[in-house]
Amino acid sequence: MESISIDKFKEIDLRVAKVLSAEKVENADKLLRLEIDLGSSTNPGQATEKRQIVSGIAEYYAPESLVGREIIVVYNLEPRTLKGLESKGMLLAASGDGFVSLLEPDKKVPPGSKIF
């Protein structure tokens, strides 16, 4: 894999999000649909921003185990449609031989907080 410059890396907007709801996607063994809260820091003075993301983690996480958790998401990823559902972001996770582990802040932080 090629190295990228720090300027290129800075183009990626990573944020903390709180999972509001999660459910399996119909007719998709690997996909979960998550509704996430990105707080109001993304739109100061505005209402809380909520988004839908679709992720291939259903084999590793029960939907109910995700609700209320803080996760790290790519905020400025181009939207993509999976099984007819628009996904506006991507959660970050580590994976290895037979496991997936979500990246989470080690302390409670407000939804929408930037990762740097």
Image (cartoon, rainbow, N blue to C red):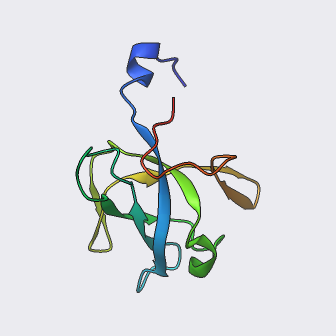
- Number of numbered discs on residues: 0
- Using the rendered view, name the quadrant where residue 85 is placed: bottom left
- Picture coordinates of residue 114, whole percent (x, y): 45, 37
* Direction front: furthest residue: 45
**Does residue 29 appear left or right of residue 34 in this picture?**
right
Q: Which residue is drawn at 50% across and 35% down?
A: 115
Q: Residue at x 75, y 61 (%)?
A: 98
- Residue 109 visible at all: yes
Nearest to the observer: residue 41 or residue 102: 41
104 up-or-down from 48: above or below: above
- Picture coordinates of residue 33, whole percent (x, y): 42, 73
- Picture coordinates of residue 81, whole percent (x, y): 28, 63
* Direction bottom: furthest residue: 26
38 up-or-down from 74: above or below: below
**Does residue 54 appear left or right of residue 63 in this picture?**
left
Q: Residue at x 37, y 45 (%)?
A: 75
